[in-house]
Amino acid sequence: MEENLLYDWSVIRSLLAILQWWTFNVTVIIINKWIFQKLDFKFPLSVSCVHFICSAVGAYLMIKVLKLKPLIAVDPVDRWRRIFPMSFVFCINIVLGNVSLRYIPVSFMQTIKSFTPATTVVLQWLVWRKYFDWRIWASLVPIVGGILLTSVTELSFNMFGFCAALFGCLATSTKTILAESLLHGYKFDSINTAMGFLIGLAPIHIHGPALIIIFLSGVLAFCLNFSIFYVIHSTTAVTFNVAGNLKVAVAVLISWMIFRNPISPLNAIGCAITLVGCTFYGYVRHMLSQQLPGTPKTPRTPRNRSELHPLVNDKDDKV
């Protein structure tokens, strides 16, 4: 009886974690798009800076004042050699995401962000000479095909926004790889990571009613960081992967209902193919990680310089 109650509570906790993650993520995306489209706010870098400031202040309150999370001590040398590169790439990723929202619809931007698994694998293969099982490469085919179909049939295509979203994928992949290689030995969570955010990247040009909405977006962005930490610790890697792809579908649907951006049938099909491909990729990664010892599988995680950089974690954060 007690085992059943524990199992039921585990399922309920996982569902609640996923729902609050979806809520914060989709809300931040919709509010940011509203700021750029409805309020015609032309400074995505300023919006990003407000997000960084709110996240840093929120993390300070959680750790130092409320003491809900312990502060992870970092060696002064490591702050510049290991934490600074991570913070810088993370900030670039957030900025590029907001820039892309300024110029392209949420549906197109979210579909391009789903290209991250492909950019991660290709980046490791080209730069770090990492070799992957053929099934990993095969699982990337529907992702690439869906992105190409979506891009060709996008009715609101903008080259600048497209490039910003694509480079954002590269930044996300780089951040994931750096997190595994540079942060080895540190058990960082999203709250402690927020303490290392770079703020003051650009002048903040905010006035009028946009100020309140952008501040609200920043507070919700901090809540999103906390929700990612909670959902990762409440679900399995497979559940996290599937929930992340369903979250993209929910964000696309809600954004279309609010902003009514034109979506052609082929464009919708391309988006669906991409999401199915991402789910299939996560499934393949999970199956390969579950292989019995002694059976052929993808290369193990390196632990020294001669083996270069490690594979990425299955639980990549999907913001």
Image (spheres, grey):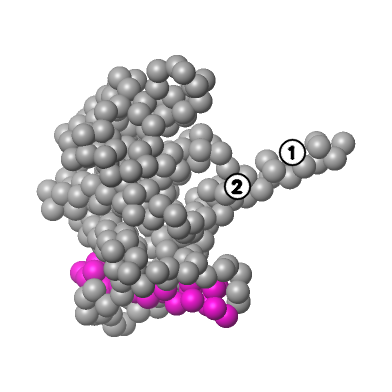
Residue 56 highlighted magenta (yes or no) = yes
Q: How far across and down, in percent of the image, does residue 238 sit?
A: 51, 34
Q: Among all residues in the image, which is located at the extreme left?
A: 159
Q: Amino acid at mark 1?
A: Tyr
- Judged from the image, the secondary structure of the residue bearing numbered disc 1 is helix
Q: Residue at x 42, y 29 (%)?
A: 285
Q: How far across and down, in percent of the image, does residue 213 sit?
A: 39, 73
Task: Give above or below for 223 relative to 8.
Answer: below
Q: Earlier in the sequence, mark 1 or mark 2?
A: 1
Q: Amino acid at mark 2?
A: Ser
Task: Give above or below for 89 relative to 214.
Answer: above
Viewer-closest of 111 and 228: 228
The picture quadrant where one finds residue 2 is top right
Q: Residue at x 28, y 24 (%)?
A: 137
Alpha-carbon distance for marks 1 and 2?
Answer: 12 Å
- Magenta span dominant secondary structure: helix
**Residue under pointer 2:** 234
- Judged from the image, the secondary structure of the residue bearing numbered disc 2 is loop
Category of crowding for the residue at label 1, using alpha-carbon neighbours closer than 10 angstroms: few (below 14), some (14–19), many (at least 20): few
Viewer-closest of 134 and 317: 134
**Residue under pointer 1:** 7
Category of crowding for the residue at label 2, using alpha-carbon neighbours closer than 10 angstroms: few (below 14), some (14–19), many (at least 20): many
Q: Is residue 101 visible?
A: no
Task: Give above or below for 125 relative to 215.
Answer: above
Viewer-closest of 292 and 197: 292
Q: Among all residues in the image, which is located at the extreme right?
A: 1
Viewer-closest of 33 and 293: 293
Which stretch appears magenta? 42-65
Q: Residue at x 32, y 61 (%)?
A: 82
Q: Are marks 1 and 2 in contact (CB under 8 Å)?
A: no
Task: Give above or below for 111 relative to 187.
Answer: above
